Image (spheres, coloured by chain):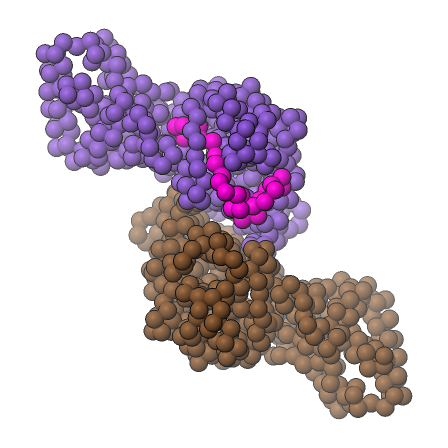
Chain colours: A brown, B purple
Amino acid sequence: MNATALADLSADDLATLLEEQRAAYEELKTRGLKLDLTRGKPSAQQLDLADDLLRLPTTTKDAYGVDVRNYGGLEGLRELREMFADLLWVEPDQVVAGGSSSLTIMRDCLFYLMLFGGVDSERPWGKEEKVRFVCPVPGYDRHFTLLESLGIEMVTVPMHDDGPDVDAVAALVADDPTIKGIWIVPTYANPSGSIVSQDVAARLAAMPTAAPDFKIFWDNAYALHHLTEDEAKSADILTLASAADHPHRPIMFASTSKITYAGAGVAFLAASTANIAWYLGHLGNGSIGPDKVNHLRHVEFFGSPQGVRDHMAKHREIIAPKFAEVDRVLTERLDGRGVATWNTPSGGYFVNLDVVPGTASRVVALAKEAGIALTPAGSSYPYKQDPDDTNIRLAPTMPPLAEVTAAMEAVATCVLLAAAEQASA
Amino acid sequence: MNATALADLSADDLATLLEEQRAAYEELKTRGLKLDLTRGKPSAQQLDLADDLLRLPTTTKDAYGVDVRNYGGLEGLRELREMFADLLWVEPDQVVAGGSSSLTIMRDCLFYLMLFGGVDSERPWGKEEKVRFVCPVPGYDRHFTLLESLGIEMVTVPMHDDGPDVDAVAALVADDPTIKGIWIVPTYANPSGSIVSQDVAARLAAMPTAAPDFKIFWDNAYALHHLTEDEAKSADILTLASAADHPHRPIMFASTSKITYAGAGVAFLAASTANIAWYLGHLGNGSIGPDKVNHLRHVEFFGSPQGVRDHMAKHREIIAPKFAEVDRVLTERLDGRGVATWNTPSGGYFVNLDVVPGTASRVVALAKEAGIALTPAGSSYPYKQDPDDTNIRLAPTMPPLAEVTAAMEAVATCVLLAAAEQASA
């Protein structure tokens, strides 16, 4: 491609481009498309990979003789905790296997902190005058929604390729005791694809914080979700924090939602043994134990930690071509135009597309009118406020490949049209 | 039996009895028993009844075309909600199907009330100076533990055969706005076996309350768990409350924990449509949907509401003889002695045994030393404080029948020995 940047076009050429894109967009609208790139959901083809689960488990007792059908075992099935301890590089005693949603486990931790406080809290967070969280942006909208629902104020810092801007984070937390935590997706972040480096993780683990009970919510949702053979290894935040004498600072979360079934997997929490006791203590007031049948189902399905890794390779075969297609179409249509930048993630579920500042909302609106559902502009920012109106999150895993192509061609048209409109205004 | 009441025995005869029971108890200890009547857990034989679940579902889509493996459907699978709406005498839109634990759903409702308030609250309960709950006693220890953990004070009223002492409840709630709720097991109550009558339910639904957001937590854990052919029909608290113009007062809870698998069933919430919207609104901030695969698994397993009822008849065949055995041994050993009263429940999971006031702790301690685990005395009271030290909860469902016999023979010896000790003191 040798496309000219819009900024370098003559007025006539810009007018021509605008007309071309308007015509392309009108043609697009006639097609009656109904495509959806909104959410990071696995496709039916990916879910099919786990359908042996439907005929498991073949027994009702685990290797330790526990009848998985009955009550009990608050911390989850030992064999499954051992398996995922291996995958998450922690000890089995530091892992809890729970229900089907890590989001719910994270919510529960926030609820416990608000209502009861943490192991190192002076009082419940709900009794503080103000509680604030550092939020790297762009980030995961559901994290922000939860914080907002609890009245926890959000302070943003930029997300870089190697993780949150750690200088900015360290400066914020050093003197302000109202800042109680930070929420990070450390591996293949939603939506930037960033991977928190060992250095950044070490600084987050070690930095002085004014709040004695500062927490790192380490949402390792995509720990094993590689898109290339260059498999990122997540920084070992628990060991780093322990070495820095802040063992109770991080709480790690993970799940098999995007490994087996999105709605019927198993979620995990990993933390210091004191944090585990704290979590189980509160959990035990309102639970007699998780679904251990589903735990055993997963143990049998995977067989071993390597079984999980092998399974992820099958996902990669299905979804890597979709990510490649997003990049191909964007490159073909937009490269050199100076109207967009995007990442080529090496894992995770999203492509982060930054369009001409001030046009993201317009792009999403144009796409919607043409039948392509995109996540609302601003969704990756607290309070849904993208200050530059530039960020769009693309989720290409769910639609079949042909629909990804059609949707991305349409998105490219919308991006160009919105940019040309703005340049002509 | 023509046993003489202890109170009517001569000093000599009492001394003889005491010696006999001491000898019997010493003999008991030599047997090395290891028996457990502590918790209301189903036996392996009961769990076996549901083992077809291990090979279900046979498909991955529900009748409405929903792929149950993926995210979504916060309110639960439509077909399962329809099935249990029928069984709970409510509309499907008034039912949410959730995870595996109704205790967790109840806890979540309390958390939402504390952190956010209810649909009719002036402020979050956590912002009130004081929050209190009415607790019929004896009652379910896990209810009390949850309330205590949240700092909600408990005020007791007696539980009668037809439900809580409704005059006492009405008097408490009429003028005191700090009293925000009552927690009731309406059908075959834990542990008394009481069944809330239509009249009592109607008064609870209609009584004036000083708190505008008074809630009835209607924990219908044993709605379908009949021990006789005389099947109790739970009072329809939602309709009664709606008719009394307090539609948002009751929230009903139920589960299949003691229908299919104790650890891997499905839990339900039923309430007014405004309460359902309130519940789902808060739930949706921390969940992308429940385990719909398990929902479909249950839909296929039962087939219909009648399938659930038929399944419960199989449970009855297994556990009714155990309850009969508890009554037989207690009658044979203690009838006429004036040392104990107990109920013969027509459903549920417990027998409520009241021993000589002041001896319940002693009985439990004696039993423990002889290898029989009983629920700690006082467990069925808030703060574990039975003011009369008289109440013991027996749970006979889990052990095989022969063990129930052995355990109850031992319990009878302990009850008699403790009573003889006290009478001789």
Q: Is residue B327 magenta?
A: no
Number of residue marks = 0
Q: Residue A299, how many percent across, how many down?
A: 41, 57
Q: Is residue A203 above or below residue B177?
A: below
Q: Is residue A366 above or below residue B126?
A: below
User: Would you say the magenta stretch is mainly helix, strand or loop?
Assistant: loop
Q: Is residue B292 above or below residue A365?
A: above
From the viewer's perspective, tell me whether residue A348 is left or right of residue B140: right
Instruction: Report if residue B276 is visible in the image.
Output: no
Q: Is residue A377 above or below residue B362?
A: below
Query: Which residue is drawn at the image coordinates 54% and 73% (left, top)?
Result: A188
Task: Give, as a single range, the part of the protein colored magenta.
Answer: B115-139
Query: Which residue is drawn at the image coordinates 17% and 10% (left, top)?
Result: B9
Instruction: Work out which quarter of the rendered image holds the C terminus of chain B and state it.
Output: top left
Instruction: Work out which quarter of the rendered image holds the N terminus of chain B and state it.
Output: top left
Query: Which residue is drawn at the image coordinates 64% and 26% (left, top)?
Result: B244
From the viewer's perspective, tell me whether residue B120 is left or right of residue A117: right
Q: Residue B107, how many percent across, how many down?
A: 48, 44
Q: Residue A268, how many percent across, how many down?
A: 44, 59
Q: Quadrant of residue A24?
A: bottom right
Instruction: Report if residue A107 is visible in the image.
Output: yes
Q: Is residue B125 magenta?
A: yes
From the viewer's perspective, tell me whether residue B250 is left or right of residue A402: left
Q: Quadrant of residue B46?
A: top left
From the viewer's perspective, tell me whether residue B313 is left or right of residue B277: left
Query: Which residue is drawn at the image coordinates 73% and 88% (left, top)?
Result: A336
Q: Residue B34, how many percent across, how many down?
A: 22, 37
